[in-house]
Image (tube, rainbow, N blue to C red):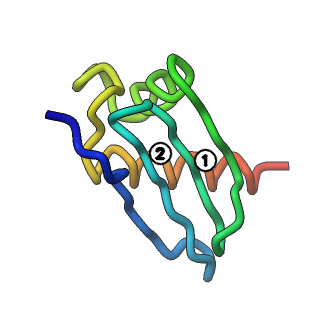
Amino acid sequence: MLSSDPRRVTAYIDDTVVCAEYSEQTGQLCLRQDGALLREWFPPHSWIAIASVAGARHWGTRPTDEDLLALLRNEMTLLRTP
Protein backbone atom coordinates (compact mmCIF):
# COMPACT_ATOMS: atom_id res chain seq x y z
CA MET A 1 0.00 0.00 0.00
CA LEU A 2 1.29 3.44 -0.90
CA SER A 3 1.64 6.13 1.72
CA SER A 4 -0.72 9.08 1.35
CA ASP A 5 1.78 11.45 2.99
CA PRO A 6 4.73 12.61 0.91
CA ARG A 7 8.22 11.51 1.89
CA ARG A 8 9.96 14.68 3.06
CA VAL A 9 13.59 15.44 3.84
CA THR A 10 15.07 18.74 4.96
CA ALA A 11 18.67 19.95 4.82
CA TYR A 12 20.58 23.14 5.58
CA ILE A 13 22.70 24.06 2.58
CA ASP A 14 24.57 27.39 2.48
CA ASP A 15 22.57 28.72 5.45
CA THR A 16 19.34 27.97 3.62
CA VAL A 17 16.63 25.50 4.56
CA VAL A 18 15.80 23.28 1.58
CA CYS A 19 13.46 20.33 1.43
CA ALA A 20 12.40 17.67 -1.02
CA GLU A 21 8.91 16.17 -0.98
CA TYR A 22 7.97 13.09 -2.99
CA SER A 23 4.48 11.59 -3.25
CA GLU A 24 4.43 7.87 -4.00
CA GLN A 25 0.76 8.17 -4.96
CA THR A 26 1.23 10.76 -7.70
CA GLY A 27 4.98 10.67 -8.39
CA GLN A 28 5.13 14.44 -7.84
CA LEU A 29 8.50 15.74 -6.63
CA CYS A 30 8.89 19.24 -5.19
CA LEU A 31 11.97 21.10 -4.02
CA ARG A 32 11.47 24.05 -1.70
CA GLN A 33 13.86 26.69 -0.40
CA ASP A 34 12.75 28.48 2.77
CA GLY A 35 9.22 27.31 1.94
CA ALA A 36 9.17 28.70 -1.61
CA LEU A 37 8.79 26.27 -4.50
CA LEU A 38 12.04 25.96 -6.49
CA ARG A 39 11.33 22.99 -8.73
CA GLU A 40 8.42 20.68 -9.41
CA TRP A 41 8.42 17.50 -11.47
CA PHE A 42 5.80 14.95 -12.39
CA PRO A 43 6.35 11.42 -13.78
CA PRO A 44 8.33 10.42 -15.68
CA HIS A 45 10.54 13.48 -15.07
CA SER A 46 10.42 13.08 -11.28
CA TRP A 47 11.51 9.44 -11.57
CA ILE A 48 14.35 10.38 -13.91
CA ALA A 49 15.53 13.18 -11.59
CA ILE A 50 15.67 10.78 -8.65
CA ALA A 51 17.26 7.94 -10.62
CA SER A 52 19.92 10.32 -11.97
CA VAL A 53 21.35 10.80 -8.47
CA ALA A 54 20.33 7.50 -6.85
CA GLY A 55 21.11 5.02 -9.57
CA ALA A 56 18.66 2.34 -10.63
CA ARG A 57 17.44 1.53 -7.10
CA HIS A 58 13.66 1.48 -7.35
CA TRP A 59 13.99 3.25 -10.73
CA GLY A 60 13.24 6.56 -9.00
CA THR A 61 9.71 5.55 -8.04
CA ARG A 62 10.39 4.77 -4.34
CA PRO A 63 13.23 7.00 -3.17
CA THR A 64 14.85 6.71 0.23
CA ASP A 65 15.69 9.69 2.40
CA GLU A 66 19.30 9.37 1.20
CA ASP A 67 18.14 9.51 -2.43
CA LEU A 68 16.18 12.70 -1.79
CA LEU A 69 19.09 14.27 0.09
CA ALA A 70 21.39 13.47 -2.85
CA LEU A 71 18.86 15.14 -5.16
CA LEU A 72 18.75 18.23 -2.92
CA ARG A 73 22.55 18.55 -2.88
CA ASN A 74 22.73 18.08 -6.64
CA GLU A 75 20.03 20.64 -7.42
CA MET A 76 21.45 23.23 -5.05
CA THR A 77 24.86 22.81 -6.72
CA LEU A 78 23.24 23.33 -10.12
CA LEU A 79 21.42 26.44 -8.92
CA ARG A 80 24.68 27.98 -7.65
CA THR A 81 26.53 27.31 -10.90
CA PRO A 82 26.58 30.43 -13.12
Q: Secondary structure at mark 2?
A: helix
**Residues at discs 2 and 1 in contact (Cβ within 8 Å):** yes
Q: Is residue 28 left or right of residue 62?
A: right
> Residue 33, how many percent across, how many down?
65, 67
Query: What count of labels does the image hold?
Result: 2
User: Is 22 placed above or below 16 here?
Assistant: above
* Relative image position of residue 25 (x, y in whole percent): 35, 33
Q: Quick check: 78 above or below 44? A: below
Question: The residue under label 1 is which amino acid type?
Answer: Glu
Of 69 and 5, nearer the camera is 5
- Residue occupying the point 50% across, 63% down: 19
* Residue occupying the point 75% across, 56% down: 80
Residue lying at the far right in this picture: please name it.
82
Circle 1: element type? helix
- Give the residue number, with chain letter if any, for mark 2: 71
Q: Residues within 10 Å of mark 2 (few under 14, many from 20)?
A: many
Which of the 4 image quarters holds residue 18?
A: bottom right
At 45% from the left edge and 70% from the top edge, which residue is drawn? Answer: 11
Residue 17's mark? none
Query: Could you classify mark 1 by the number of other residues whose Cα lies within 10 Å: few (under 14), some (14-19), or many (20 or more)?
Result: some
Mark 2 residue type = Leu
Q: Is residue 70 left or right of residue 35?
A: left
Q: Quadrant of the N terminus?
A: top left
The residue at 57%/75% (across/down) is 17
Point out residue 62 in the picture as x, y percentages from the top left corner.
27, 33
Horizontal and vertical percent for residue 48? 48, 22
When the figure is inspected, residue 49 is found, relative to residue 15, above or below; the finding is: above
Give the left or right position of residue 69, taking residue 80 as reference. left
Alpha carbon distance from label 2 to label 1: 6 Å
Residue picked out by circle 1: 75
